[in-house]
Image (cartoon, coloured by chain):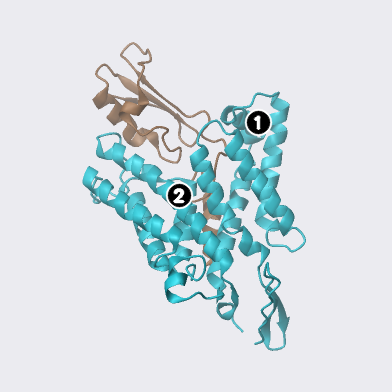
Chain colours: A brown, B cyan
Amino acid sequence: MILLQILVPTIAFFSTPPARFGFQMVAGYEIRDSVVVRDSEGSEIPVDELDLWHAPLRPELNWAERLPTHACSHVAVAHDVVVLQYATGRQVVLCP
Amino acid sequence: MSLTSVQVDARPVALARICVGIGYAVCLLEALAVLSDVAAGQLSYPVLEALPSPSTQLVTVLGMVGVLASVLLILGVLSRLSAFVGLFVLIVAQLLDQQTYSNHLVLCTLLLAYLAVVQSGSRWSVDARLRGRRDEVPWWPQLLMMSQVSVCYLFAGLSKVNPIFLSGEVLSEVLWVEAPNSWFRALAIVTISSEVFLAVGLWLRLTRHVAVLVGLGLHGGIVALFDGGWVTFTAFALLCISAYWMFLVRPRFTRTASGLEVVDSELPTGLVTTERA
């Protein structure tokens, strides 16, 4: 059991941070993460995050998986969403 | 003699039960806040698409059951069952949406799992009042709680050994105090050193009392200096500190020809329990 207690966070430690089950608390990997919803001209659309998702978003999640689709469906003039995360880098996801 | 036969004072784990019960209440409410937002139509991150989405009714039921489990755990009513129910509620909450994940929630979940098998209601509990108290309980589940807290500290410290944290930038952003960046860089090193020291120092007789003071200072500093989130950090502190007394009275073993022997189990009152294989 103790070996399992050590093994799981060890695996997380050697995974791409921030990783779950690794007790990686306030380690700093998420400090530059950001989400920007843009219009067709590339200008940022001010978004009240609290209206759209439970902020702050967990940094262990891949925000590009679901957040852009959700944002696009709730922000009328959204053209794309720029997601920046430590683990995945900068991704621009077009609204459908 | 096996580790499972070692008996220790029941009071440290009773205190742990109360601390974890309070920490659990906070963790539960945080998870329910996430699930409430998801149930209200905010962004969801299902663990498995096949699992049901959280509904307002389900969140309410989880909340009622979870809060009841928390209260019963703190009071020491059907302690093991309360811990198990609390554990079950937390697991369900985490399975309903990935956004409920947090490191302190995972720690709480694990500590509840250990409490579900430890006799934490033997002292300072309604259980003890109704059924009679037990002064000694098996030690082995407490060993798991202690090792879990140590692992948490170790990896919390090691994960901070990176250029971002060491630059002081993280602390300068999350703390409300203003200071030269050199102070935050120094504080970053102190933080990492403290956490790694705690992972080891709590186990050693020579350093465990100092380690307790370092731990109290670390958690107190986090609660006092972080810009917001003091409730969460207090809960996290309670989860970690719940094991401190166990470290202070950890039994000491020696290896004999017949196997492991408990040399002594230091108790605050001076009561010593010795066992031979």
Observer-nearest residue: B87 or B270? B270
**Sequence order check: which comes first, mark 1 or mark 2?**
2
Q: Residues within 10 Å of mark 1 (few under 14, many from 20)?
A: many
What percent of the width, then of the height, locates residue B129? 45, 70
Q: Quadrant of residue B183?
A: top right
> Going 55% across and 30% down the picture, which residue do you hit?
B227
Q: Nearer the viewer, mark 1 or mark 2?
A: 2
Q: Are marks 1 and 2 in contact (CB under 8 Å)?
A: no
Badge 2 density bin: few <14, some 14–19, many ≥20, Cα 10 Å: many
Residue placed most toward the observer, A71 or B88? B88
Q: Is residue A76 above or below residue B265?
A: above
Q: Chain of mark 1?
A: B
Q: How many numbered circles are shown?
A: 2
Q: Position of residue B5 (x, y in %)?
A: 57, 81
Q: Disc 2 is attached to a residue of which chain?
A: B
The residue that mark 2 highlights is B105
Check disc 1 and report the residue beneath it: B168
Residue B15, disc: none
| Residue B247, picture quadrant | bottom right
Is residue B49 visible from the viewing direction of this image? no
Image spot of residue A1 (x, y percent): 52, 67
Tell me if residue B227 comes above or below residue B17 in the rendering: above
Amino acid under label 2? Answer: Leu
How far, Cα to Cα, is label 1 from label 2? 26 Å
What is the three-letter code of the residue carrying label 1?
Gly
In the displayed structure, does residue B108 sit left or right of residue B61? right
Identity of the residue drawn at 77% across and 61% down: B206
Is residue B101 left or right of B161 when viewed as pictured? Answer: left
Between B248 and A5, the residue placed more toward the observer is: B248
